[in-house]
Image (spheres, grey):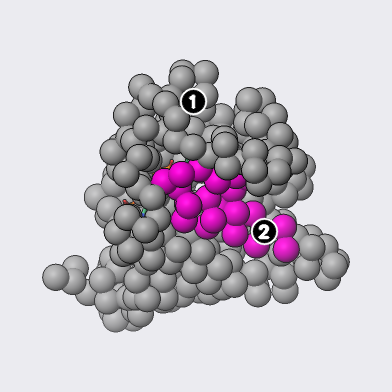
Amino acid sequence: MPLRIESKTQALLRKGRSAKVAGCVAGAASRDRTAIVVLLTNTGNRPVALITGASSGIGETFARKLAARGYDLILVARRADRLNALAAELPVHSEILPADLTTEEGLQAAEAAIRNCPQLALLVNNAGFGTLKRFWVADLHGQEQMHKLHVMAAMRLTHAALGAMTERGHGAVINVSSVAAFGQTEGNVSYCATKAWMNAFTQGLDIELRGAGSKVKVQALCPGYTMSEFHDTLGVDRNNIPRFMWLQADAVVEASLRGLDRGEVIVIPGAVYKIGAAVMRHLSHGLRRRIGKPGKLGKDQRV
Ligand SMILES: NC(=O)c1ccc[n+]([C@@H]2O[C@H](COP(=O)([O-])OP(=O)(O)OC[C@H]3O[C@@H](n4cnc5c(N)ncnc54)[C@H](OP(=O)(O)O)[C@@H]3O)[C@@H](O)[C@H]2O)c1
């Protein structure tokens, strides 16, 4: 059942109030009949960041840290109540865009929000999830959804953002990937493959941007195990993973933003994972096959 169609923004526009007051999401709301706009703000000249998957974990942490850095925000995810609560709490102008980015409707709404936002300075493609079981046993729908979210949504939103950013000569895109991009493990085939795509996509974009002499930055953020709702959604017991392997979302986002300041294209938070990724990069497939068995850590991944 679609949500009430008319947003506060649309109501004001209908009453003839200044279009300038309408934030970046107004255009998106008119396209996405399920979208609602809760906060109505003029973002003025402040930079705006659009964050997907902002309703929890790493995305929510990006929202808090970017707000502290003076960004206004567009928060995208499916759970409108979570986005609403976060927007109300943040000390900056925040608009929410409840959207399922695996649907054409949701994706078009987010693309429109990006295109309608001349102050967009940062896009964070963060929304993502994992699945369990070997590829041929896993539900095909979940595998398709993962590819739609990690690959198609990230690709389309980046395309929507980069046109205007390259014209303006500044801006950045952060793709939240994973250390899973550097190897393969049983039960994680699509996850590793989509995250490896994210890294390759980001590095390719960096080559094109540098080649074009652009100052626009791109980054693939590659965290290891991070405390968030990810493993709850997945149904995996965190106790199977040693404590030293866990990162806090705060440290992950801090490393990303520090890396962005320095122009780092691949950011791997934490010494353990930096070393692990460096080793994985140089291993033969035969050795990766042995390492990729579920073992004790991944016992939830067994069919
Ligand atoms: N946690 C880890 O150990 C870890 C490690 C490496 C990489 N990562 C990556 O970090 C990113 C963030 O994950 P997290 O750890 O913060 O997990 P999380 O707390 O579960 O957050 C995932 C976010 O993605 C959103 N999302 C999921 N499906 C969506 C859809 N179809 N449309 C729009 N939004 C959707 C969720 O919001 P709604 O449910 O409200 O839509 C939520 O805000 C993911 O890309 C993940 O692959 C996580």
At 72% from the left and 70% from the top, the residue drawn is 166
The magenta-colored residue range is 179-204
Secondary structure that dominates the magenta span: helix
Along the polypeptide, which appears first: circle 1 or circle 2?
2
Residue nearest the viewer, comparing 135 with 126? 135
Q: How many marks?
A: 2
Q: Which quarter of the rendered picture does the N terminus lie within?
A: bottom left
Residue nearest the viewer, comparing 151 with 95? 151
Q: Is residue 190 left or right of residue 133?
A: right
Dot 2: what SS? helix
Q: Position of residue 288 (x, y in %)?
A: 61, 41
Dot 1: what SS? loop
At 66% from the left and 51% from the top, the residue drawn is 219
Residue nearest the viewer, comparing 50 with 117? 50
Residue under pointer 2 = 200
Please name the amino acid that badge 1 sits on.
Answer: Trp
Q: Is residue 288 above or below residue 35?
A: above
Q: Position of residue 59 (x, y in %)?
A: 45, 45
Q: Which quarter of the rendered picture does the C terminus lie within?
A: top left
At 46% from the left and 20% from the top, the residue drawn is 242
Residue nearest the viewer, comparing 115 with 300? 300
Label disc, if present, on residue 246 of the rendered structure: 1
Q: Is residue 147 magenta?
A: no
Is residue 90 visible to us here? no
Q: Is residue 35 above or below residue 274?
A: below
